[in-house]
């Protein structure tokens, strides 16, 4: 086992998870921090890593799996910054620079869903497949894709949660996305569920009509991904998917929407095609952040 230590941050709109991992990617310590203001959050992150350096020693490299939107263009002056995020107070925050300064080590950043897709394709539910999509449904809705051993890396991340799809029958909710109102995120993310029903997803009973609407919108994205990206597996994660019955409901809606048209051997096997994450501890996002850090160290040594 390498003696290298890696710092990882899974940055979400509700919570942040910081960790230190060893050379094999095993987590040695982690902490959960509520996503309040940037200064408060980064002060807590700094305190965590000060303590970890005392106990474990210096950090070799770091990785950040962050909510977005993010500037992912390496040639941009604002590379690693959040852009116009709907999270109040976080637009333009330099996520990569502040984290790298705190851990005092070179660091990389990508979206939380890209990192989760990489982790699930490498170690989890998509292991052994060439093309895996990961969708999170929580504070926001996003999709990442890992293909043939590499992340899908445009200069700007694909904002799949902000596409529009057909409305579920009987749905008259206006939506709450500040930019698009009734995009999928505006209709089906966790905060949208609370705004629509007056209760958080975890407080809604299993027979509540909310789950029919939710399954419709998640399945609609899965159908679009199937026909556009042709993944071999779609992994669904995020806080809203902690309602286990939602997976079966999404599969039923997917069957209806796709109507058997142009499905391949992967998407036709719906029970395995749409599935929960294979990783639990660490979470897919945090595991992906660790892989970013390890990959950066390997690259510096002339590896992959």
Image (cartoon, grey):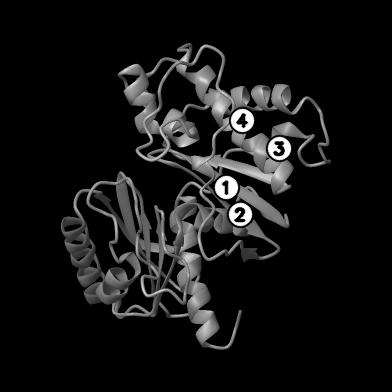
**Residue at figure coordinates x 40%, y 53% from the top left:** 68
Q: Quadrant of the C terminus?
A: bottom right
**Residue at figure coordinates x 47%, y 27% from the top left:** 243
Q: Is residue 3 visible?
A: yes
Q: Which mark is residue 150?
A: none
Question: CA–CA distance between discs 3 and 4?
Answer: 14 Å
Point out the tag, 1 or 4, that comes first from the N-terminus: 1
**Residue at figure coordinates x 36%, y 70% from the top left:** 78
Which residue position holds label 4? 219
Q: Is residue 226 left or right of residue 205?
A: right
Which residue position holds label 2? 145
Q: Position of residue 159 (x, y in %)?
A: 51, 48
Point out the tag, 4 or 2, that comes first from the N-terminus: 2
Circle 2 residues within 10 Å: few <14, some 14–19, many ≥20: many
Which residue position holds label 3? 272
Q: Are marks 3 and 1 in contact (CB under 8 Å)?
A: no
Point out the tag, 2 or 3, that comes first from the N-terminus: 2
């Amino acid at each position: 086992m390498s003696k290298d230590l890696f710092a990882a941050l899974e940055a979400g709109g509700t919570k942040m998870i910081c960790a230190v991992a060893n050379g094999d990617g095993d987590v040695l310590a982690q902490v959960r921090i509520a996503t309040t203001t940037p200064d408060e959050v980064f002060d807590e992150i700094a305190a965590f890593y000060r303590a970890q350096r005392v106990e474990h020693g210096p950090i070799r490299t770091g990785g950040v799996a962050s909510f977005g939107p993010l500037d992912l263009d390496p040639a941009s002056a604002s590379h690693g910054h959040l852009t116009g995020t709907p999270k109040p107070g976080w637009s333009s925050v330099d996520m990569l620079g502040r984290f790298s300064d705190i851990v005092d080590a070179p660091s990389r950043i990508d979206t939380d869903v890209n990192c989760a897709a990489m982790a699930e394709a490498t170690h989890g539910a998509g292991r052994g497949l060439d093309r895996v999509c990961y969708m999170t449904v929580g504070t926001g809705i996003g999709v990442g894709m890992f293909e043939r051993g590499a992340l899908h890396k445009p200069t700007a991340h694909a904002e799949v949660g902000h596409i529009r799809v057909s409305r579920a029958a009987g749905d008259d909710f206006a939506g709450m996305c500040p930019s698009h109102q009734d995009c999928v995120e505006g209709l089906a993310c966790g905060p949208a569920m609370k705004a629509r029903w007056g209760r958080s997803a975890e407080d809604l009973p299993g027979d509540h009509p909310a789950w029919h609407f939710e399954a419709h919108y998640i399945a609609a994205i899965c159908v679009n991904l199937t026909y556009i990206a042709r993944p071999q597996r779609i992994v669904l994660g995020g806080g809203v998917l902690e309602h286990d019955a939602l997976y079966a409901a999404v599969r039923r809606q997917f069957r209806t929407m796709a109507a058997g048209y142009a499905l391949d051997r992967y998407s036709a096997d719906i029970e395995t095609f749409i599935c929960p994450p294979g990783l639990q501890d660490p979470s897919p996002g945090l595991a992906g952040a660790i892989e970013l850090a390890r990959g950066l160290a390997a690259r510096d040594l002339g590896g992959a």
